Structures are given as structure tokens and as C-alpha cells.
Image (cartoon, helix red, strand yellow):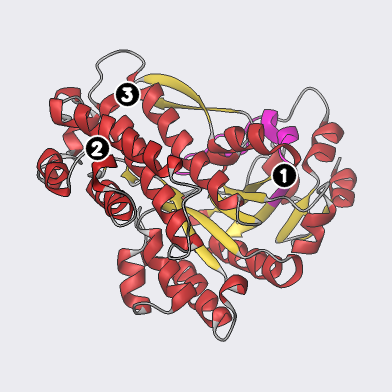
């Protein structure tokens, strides 16, 4: 078995990854089994650099707030703001504190110096404006979309005025109430104002679509794409808040499913412009149905990767990532009868493996699933191995 794995493993380089794929994918998804480990982000950064220099990739998308990500994109593409400010305001989920993320932004800005606009690297967050405790106010997305349209269409076509929109939105701090995640009655998602805002958001997005053929001499591709992003974020947030206020047994399933839909829609929009490297948790990018326990119930949903794969076919590729140890978290050397344990015996600190070939070599019964002593790490599910195009393996993660 070890000999079979040795024959399957290659040094972790973009060229080795591409040899395992039928074609250069429009959306190349790199998963991770845990968050907050800079070693994995360093691997991502190096792979992206090689994809840029050798395969023509120009966009990286990470599991961070899509609206906050515009701050980062303005910096790397056009030099707006300082690096310190961008790291503070341009990321969600605490990702701005990562040294590896800071290095990524610095390198992208340096790469873009002196290049034409069309040849510059672009950065995107592709998560919704969400945190674990709930969704943000839809103000930023709705007001930006309204302003975009107000500057370009007859005022009579708009479903409301800016003043009416402001009144309906109310105070921003009433939307992301952390208590609403456990207590639906605390959510404002089904108030009369929220219901009216959902109709307005729908009308604004429809109007934007109707105006697509409008002469665009004064509207850049970036402006049009951002308007579409604002529309997706507004509709997605209002849907999310609506289901946060729900009291039915399907509430949590709908919430995780809606987040997956937001992730997928943002990825598909980015892929329209050219090849993208996307980086997120394995569970968000796998082709199989995802599942987790929330509020004492097991919920299942189709991940962003599954949704994108259904749309893109061979133009979607998924690289799952497995790790050996995370000793700072109590995750020690894996048992030898797990996939991670078999990989741990390889003479590689970092490598890429042909996942379908490995799955076939392992056969049935499948290896024992690894059990993690730390909730923040999700071991590789052996049943999902064949659904990945390749497996990235990192032997040991540094502490912290």
C-alpha cells in the first residue's frame, strides 16, 4: 500500500497539479481542513504565485466577506489605501490578522506595479457579509446598488428613493443581533420593513438586469460587476435574515444552504472573468453533500463547490487538503489505518496526490475515518476521496 502511495505522490507544484486535471479549470478550488493555520495559507500563496506565473491565473478568492474584499481589491489593483488599513477593514472572520494573508496582499500589490489594468491580479472575498453570529445589515449593498442605478436610469424606474430606503433599513446594529442565531424572535428578518426591503432588492436587481444592454461608455466592467455583487449581497442577506427569524425545524438547514448559495454565486460570477483560484474549507468546496451538527441537529446541504460543479462541469476542479499533525491543537500523528496515516508514512512534507487513483488503490473496505480531538479540524472523509481531483497533503502544521 505504501508503495502505491509513493507512486501516486508528486512534489506540490502548480505544474504537478495541472497534470492531474483534464484541462485548465476556470475555477480551481483549494480546500483546507481547518482555519487559522498560516502554514496552509503559505501553501496557498505559493500555489497561487505559480498559477499566476505559469498558468495565467489572475484572481484569487478567499472565504471572507465579499463586500469587505472590495477594499483589498482596490488596494492590490489600484493602490488605494495603506496595507495596514486594508488588513484591518478588508477581511472578515479575523483573517486580516494573518501574516500569510498580509504577505499575499503585499505580493499582489507589488506584482501589479506597472502592469496594464487587464493584466493585474485581482482579489475577492466570496463569502456573504456573514459571521457565525449572524448577517450584517443590508445597508451597504442596497444603498450602493440604488446609487449605481440612480446615476444611470430615469428616477421613475426606481422602486424607492434613497430616503425611503434609509427609513426602511433603520439602525444598522439591529440587524446582526448575535442572540438571533439561537432565538428567532430576536431577528428583524420578518418585520414589515424587512419584507418591503426584500421586494425592493428584487426590483433593483431586476432593473439592473434589464439595463444590461444600456450604453456603457461611462460604466466600466468593474462598476458593472460590483453592481451585480451588491445585488447578490443584498438579496442574499435579506433571505438570510428572513430565515434567521424562522421557527420551523428546517431553519438551520436553510441558513447553511443559503450561505452555500451565496458562496457559489460569487464564485461563478468571478469565473466569468477568467480563471480563479478559490480557497476555503474543504466542506465548502467538495462535490459531495456537506453535513454538520448545529443546535443538536444534523443538517445537510449542497456546498458551494457542489453547486459550482453542477454549473461548470470539467471547468471546476477541487483540490482537497489533508494534514498530518496540528500539535499546537493536540492533533498528533494519525493512526496508520487512516488516509492521513497512510500519507504520513510518505517521505514528503508537502505533496499532491492523484485522489481518484488513490481511492481506487485503497479499494474496499475504505480506511478508517480519522477522529480529531479538536473541534476546529475536520479530518478527510475517506468516502469523499474519489470526488476530489487531487489531494494536497501537508505533513505538519506549525504551532499557533
Name the residue that disc number 2 marks. 159
Name the residue that disc number 1 marks. 315
The stretch of residues the image draws in magenta is 369-392
Name the outermost residue toward the top.
Answer: 249
Mark whose residue sits in front, 1 or 3: 1
Q: Is residue 160 above or below residue 250?
A: below
Residue 399 visible in this rendered orientation of the protein? no
As rendered, which of 335 and 112 lies closer to the eye?
A: 112
Q: Are marks 2 and 3 in contact (CB under 8 Å)?
A: no
* Residue 378 is inside the magenta segment: yes
Name the residue that disc number 3 marks. 295
| Element assignment for label 2 | loop
Q: From the image, which quarter does the N terminus lie in?
A: top right
Residue 125 x %, y %:
45, 55
Residue 274 x %, y %:
64, 57
* Residue 299 is inside the magenta segment: no
Few, some or many residues within 10 Å of mark 2 (<14, 14–19, 20+)? some
Residue 158 x %, y %:
26, 42
| Element assignment for label 3 | loop
What is the spatial separation of the Cα atoms under label 2 and label 3, in whole angstroms? 39 Å
94 with respect to 339 (left or right): left
| Quarter residue 241 falls in | top left
| Element assignment for label 1 | helix
Residue 85 visible in this rendered orientation of the protein? yes
Amino acid at each position: 500500500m505504501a508503495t502505491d502511495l509513493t507512486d501516486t505522490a508528486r512534489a506540490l507544484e502548480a505544474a504537478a497539479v495541472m497534470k492531474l486535471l483534464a484541462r485548465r479549470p476556470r475555477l480551481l478550488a483549494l480546500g483546507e481542513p481547518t482555519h487559522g493555520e498560516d502554514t496552509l495559507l503559505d501553501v496557498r500563496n505559493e500555489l497561487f504565485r505559480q498559477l499566476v506565473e505559469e498558468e495565467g491565473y489572475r484572481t484569487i478568492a478567499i472565504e471572507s466577506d465579499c463586500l469587505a474584499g472590495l477594499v483589498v481589491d482596490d488596494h492590490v489593483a489600484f493602490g488605494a489605501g495603506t496595507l495596514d488599513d486594508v488588513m484591518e477593514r478588508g477581511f472578515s472572520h479575523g483573517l486580516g490578522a494573518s501574516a500569510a494573508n498580509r504577505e499575499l496582499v503585499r505580493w499582489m500589490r507589488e506584482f501589479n506595479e506597472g502592469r496594464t489594468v487587464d493584466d493585474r491580479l485581482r482579489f475577492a472575498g466570496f463569502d456573504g457579509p456573514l459571521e457565525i453570529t449572524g448577517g450584517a445589515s443590508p445597508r451597504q449593498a442596497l444603498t450602493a446598488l440604488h446609487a449605481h442605478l440612480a446615476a444611470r436610469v430615469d428616477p421613475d424606474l426606481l422602486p424607492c428613493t434613497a430616503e425611503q430606503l434609509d427609513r426602511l433599513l433603520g439602525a444598522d446594529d439591529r440587524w446582526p443581533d448575535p442572540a438571533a442565531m439561537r432565538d428567532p424572535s430576536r431577528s428583524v428578518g420578518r418585520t414589515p420593513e424587512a419584507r418591503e426591503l426584500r421586494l425592493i432588492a428584487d426590483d433593483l436587481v431586476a432593473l439592473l438586469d434589464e439595463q444590461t444592454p444600456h450604453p456603457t461608455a461611462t460604466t466600466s466592467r468593474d462598476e458593472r460587476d460590483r453592481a451585480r455583487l451588491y445585488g447578490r449581497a443584498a438579496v442574499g442577506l435579506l433571505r438570510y435574515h428572513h430565515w434567521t427569524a424562522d421557527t420551523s425545524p428546517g431553519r438551520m438547514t436553510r441558513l447553511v444552504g443559503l450561505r452555500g448559495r451565496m458562496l457559489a454565486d460569487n464564485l461563478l460570477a468571478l469565473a466569468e472573468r477568467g480563471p480563479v483560484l478559490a480557497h476555503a474549507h474543504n466542506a465548502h468546496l467538495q462535490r459531495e453533500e456537506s453535513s454538520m451538527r448545529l443546535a443538536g441537529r444534523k443538517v445537510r446541504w449542497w456546498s458551494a463547490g457542489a453547486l459550482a460543479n453542477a454549473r461548470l462541469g470539467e471547468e471546476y476542479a477541487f483540490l482537497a487538503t489533508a494534514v498530518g499533525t496540528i500539535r499546537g491543537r493536540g492533533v498528533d500523528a494519525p493512526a496508520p489505518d487512516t488516509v492521513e496515516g497512510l500519507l504520513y508514512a510518505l517521505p514528503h512534507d508537502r505533496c499532491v496526490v492523484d485522489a481518484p487513483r488513490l481511492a481506487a488503490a485503497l479499494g474496499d473496505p475504505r480506511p478508517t475515518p480519522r477522529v480529531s480531538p479538536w473541534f476546529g479540524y475536520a479530518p478527510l472523509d475517506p468516502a469523499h476521496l474519489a470526488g476530489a481531483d487531487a489531494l494536497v497533503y501537508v505533513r505538519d502544521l506549525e504551532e499557533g
